[in-house]
Image (cartoon, grey):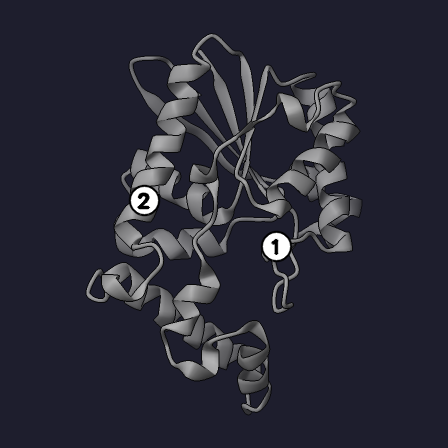
Amino acid sequence: MPSIYLIRHGQASFGQQNYDALSELGVQQAVKLGDSFRNRVDQFDQVCLGSMFRHQQTAESCLKSMQMQSGPTDWNKDPGWNEYDHQDILAQMGPQFATADSIQRYVASQENPKAVFEKLFNDAINRWMSGENDSDYVETWSHYQSRIKQALNHVCETFSQAKNIAVFTSGGPISVIAQHLLGVPAEKIMQMNWTLVNCGVTKVISTGRRTFVSSMNEHPHFEGEHKHLVTYK
């Protein structure tokens, strides 16, 4: 009966040309998470992760802190655990949003940059999720959900004899799985996503007969003197 630990990557470089890399703080988060896991689960029987660089960086820093002997050649990489392409989703809102640099310029020119960006991002995600413009996107919302559920099923079936499994992924896939298993209305999924902490942990149990969420968005490793490590990017 595997315990599957869905781990959101550490803080990425949001707003930079290359978002798919951890910030210095993101590395610190992954190291602290590893410290916590060392006392909590000892070792992972299997390590799974998406193919994004920030997933690998988080896994490397976390597992090194746990003093695990396995390395990247022992891990199970599956792009099914990858996040949606936020740049492609934003780009469909207009030519001024085609690149990270152009988005930064646009937002910086506004009176309230933070509020403007939040509205832009929410509008872009809602347009994508509506399913009314599927031909515009590299990956549709429907396909995105399906591949994530398939990735989870693959882990449950392939490693059914494992005790503890680590999955290094992103906030979107964790939200899709939680929404699916908990029966949360689809329109609430992004509200759930915004609450997920970098290097927070959502625990899923697979019994063979059913799969269920045991806990969600755990981050006690960032409480007290480590509260400065709480981020959501």
Q: Residue furthest top?
A: 161
Give the side of residue 88 with respect to residue 185, left or right.
Answer: right
Label 1 element class: loop
Query: Cα distance, mark 2 to mark 1?
Result: 21 Å
Q: Is residue 206 visible?
A: no
Q: Is label 2 in a helix, a strand or a loop?
A: helix
Q: Which residue is mark 2?
A: 145
Q: Amino acid at mark 1?
A: Asp
Q: Percent position (x, y) of residue 43?
A: 67, 17
Q: Tag 1 or tag 2, which sits nearer the N-term?
A: 1
Position of 80 compared to 199: left or right? left
Quadrant containing the C terminus is bottom right
The residue pinned by badge 1 equals 20
Identity of the residue drawn at 42% across and 16% down: 158
Which amino acid is tagged 2?
A: Gln
Disc 2 vs disc 1: Cβ atoms closer than 8 Å? no
